[in-house]
Amino acid sequence: MGKRSFEEAEGSNADGQEQNQHQQRNRNPHNRFNPKNIAKRQKTTQKINDGNLSQIKKRVRAIERLLEHKNEKLPANVRNDLERELQAHKQRIADESDKKLRSKMISKYHMVRFFERKKAMRLAKQLMKQLDETKDEAEIARLKADLHIAEVDLDYALYHPHMETYISLYPKSKDEATEKDEKSSAAYHLHSSRPPMWTTIEKAREEGKSALEKIRDRRPERDFSKPSFKKTAKKSSSQNEERPAKGKYGKTEEESESDDGGFFEED
């Protein structure tokens, strides 16, 4: 078997070195081309696409930190892409939180709205019956005004915003308990003060059902320009100053020196 030439030996050594460097790069845990890192990024992306809220929040914080980093010079197209992605993720988080809040508020005020809707509907039927039976013009005008209030009460219970606190129209009181046999709760509170949302519902009734549904389904306003995470304030220099070291019994060196006398003081 003959010896290899110098060129063949040098070529094989160079190929071996390149292969070793390639393997070292792949084994480097911080290398973005590491197969483990690629698989990890693909898994995170899949979770974000599937709607994993915790992964979406992590991605939002990562993008915000990257955009606010002064030393990081990003190309204009990369910055625009990150800003669009950030807005999309924030909108998904807002949609998810609004969905949970809506469900929570509906279950919380379901019974109150149900009973007040029934009371307002019953009162409206009673007033319409009285309106059909009476012929006095003054009484007719009074009954029409009361009927309008009862109808707005009914729409208030139906179309009050689901994601806002529901204020009761007919709260229980001691005076109401004494007059319970004489008239209903809705009739007792017919001329009582109404919450501000009542006036909004009254005006929306003139525009139609679509305006009422818009009020019922409206969502809280959000400012997506603000960062989603809070920056922790740095401690002041006075707080970081070193405190005097304490001795064995919890005293500083100055306190221990002042207590050196005691019963053994010299005359």
Image (tube, rainbow, N blue to C red):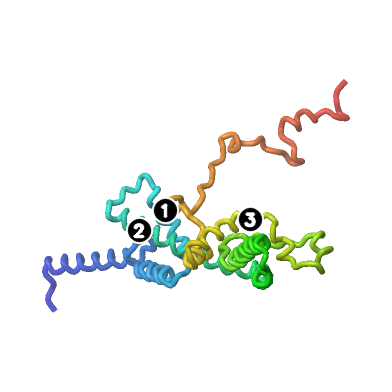
State the CA–CA distance, disc 3 to disc 2: 40 Å
Tell me if label 1 and label 3 are in contact, CB under 8 Å: no
Residue 134 quadrant: bottom right
Residue receiving disc 1: 64
Of 92 and 258, the residue lying toward us: 92
How crowded pointer 3 is (Cα within 10 Å; few <14, some 14-19, many 20+) is rated as few
Q: Nearer the viewer, residue 4 or 155?
A: 155
Report the Cα–Cα distance between label 1 and label 2.
12 Å
Of 213 and 80, nearer the camera is 213
Which is nearer the N-term, disc 3 or disc 2? 2
Residue at (80, 67) in percent of width and height: 182
Q: Could you tell me residue 179's position as x and y percent?
A: 82, 64
SS for callout 2:
helix
The answer to which image quadrant residue 89 occupies is: bottom left
The numbered dot on residue 195 is 3
Q: Residue at x 77, y 67 (%)?
A: 183
Report helix, strand or loop for mark 3.
loop
The residue type indicated by label 2 comes to Arg
Say whether residue 253 is visible.
yes
Q: Is residue 16 above or below residue 65?
A: below
Using the image as rendered, state which of residue 69 and residue 50 is in the foreground: 50
